[in-house]
Amino acid sequence: MTGKTVLIAGATGVVGKAAVEHFKSLGGWTTIALSRRRLDIPDDGSFRHVAVDLRDPEPCRSAVAAMPEVTHLVYAALYEKPGLVEGWRDPEQMATNLAMLRNLLEPLLEKSRSLQHVSLLQGTKAYGIHIHRIAVPARERWPRDPHENFYWLQEDFLRDAAASHGFGTTIFRPQVVFGDVVGVAMNLTPVIGAYAAICREEGLPFSYPGGPAYVLEAVDARLIAKALAWAAVAPTARNETFNITNGDVFVWQNVWPAIAGMLGVEPGPDKPMSMGEFMPAQAAAWDRIVKKHGLRPLSLRDVLGESHHYADFTFAYGAQRRPPPALVSTIKIRQAGFADCIDTEDMFRDLFRSLEAKRILPPVRGS
């Protein structure tokens, strides 16, 4: 198949940015990145960036009209409210996320019939992990968990459109996603890295700030990007839903000493505290770190986005008892033909090095 053009919506997000970098590296693809903000990717001519706010339908329509024919859509855009977790069951937030998908997809379909495939991102909130214990491992074939979720609104809209217009779909449900972007809603990499830098600057032990230990899974955004490219053309991925993880499991307390070593700090005894409260209070310390190490002039808020609130949720801060395991089955995607994996500690090492290379985190040696 030739003449493939992929439009990646939400291109400055943790998954979207990884998808842009991966697709533009592949032969045979024209890559269009869509986002409100400028991408933190060198403009080397290998992709085209379109700046638009998906919440506004008319600019979306105008942007689509100016695009070449789009054959594949990766929809990784997301609207979250400040404070993050409180918005996950908010009807207005659900309606906004549905409207954003509609504002993009409807003009694409009205423009032409060239669209062949759409990938949509969900997550383990599809199994109700944010509101109740889930059975282990969570499987894609289960009936929908009976709770309100914008996932279901988007999925129903997308499947109806696919049935009417003849394109294929693939829905991905990643576990906790990690990448090398900053200022987003849910990416713990810069939160952990900035926390370590602040501990080093202030002479504090790098203590694990969460609650009781529990077993969960991670997924590297770069791995998701590979899966998105696979699903775009694989017949076995058409009209399917897949869980996706790195392939191993971890416990925060067990991996914390390795993370400390990667970031050049000394781990301390566990010390439960809210990252949502602690990190914003360290803005002045962060400014000193930026000046001392010649980092990019980003405020702590620019680095964190809303991800420090996500840290509290993912670290089980405030939990009175050990949370149940948060595990999903990845048998289905492997049987369908995608079997890539990465060791989670290697993932952390790669991503911290990337943030250091971008002068977002200070070098491990150099304090």
Image (cartoon, helix red, strand yellow):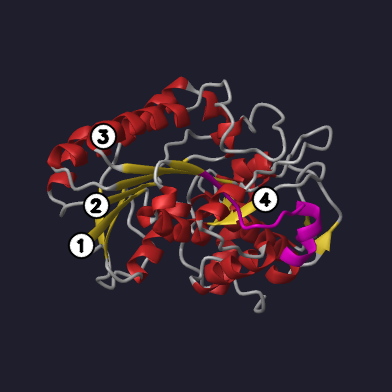
- Residue shown at 60%/40% (left/top)? 309
Q: Position of residue 53 (x, y in %)?
A: 29, 41
Can I make out residue 232 in this image? yes
What residue is shown with label 2? 71
Q: Type of residue at label 3? A: Asn
- Residue shown at 51%/58% (left/top)? 337
Q: Position of residue 213 (x, y in %)?
A: 81, 45
Mark 4 is surrounded, within 10 Å at the Cα level, by few (under 14), some (14 to 19) or many (20 or more) other residues, namely many
Mark 1 is surrounded, within 10 Å at the Cα level, by few (under 14), some (14 to 19) or many (20 or more) other residues, namely few
Disc 1 + disc 2, Cβ < 8 Å? yes
Secondary element at image label 3: helix
Identify the mark at residue 3; answer none if there is no mark. Answer: 1
Which comes before the other along the chain, label 3 or label 4? Answer: 3
Identify the mark at residue 217; answer none if there is no mark. Answer: 4
Number of marks present in the image shown: 4
Disc 1 + disc 4, Cβ < 8 Å? no
**What separation in Å lies between label 1 and label 4 (alpha carbons)?**
37 Å
Which comes before the other along the chain, label 1 or label 2? Answer: 1
The C terminus, quarter of image: bottom right
- Residue shown at 65%/68% (left/top)? 346
- Residue shown at 56%/73% (left/top)? 293
Magenta residues, start to end = 242-259
Q: Type of residue at label 4? A: Glu
Secondary element at image label 4: loop
What residue is shown with label 3? 103
Q: Type of residue at label 1? A: Gly
Q: Nearer the viewer, residue 339 or 20?
A: 339
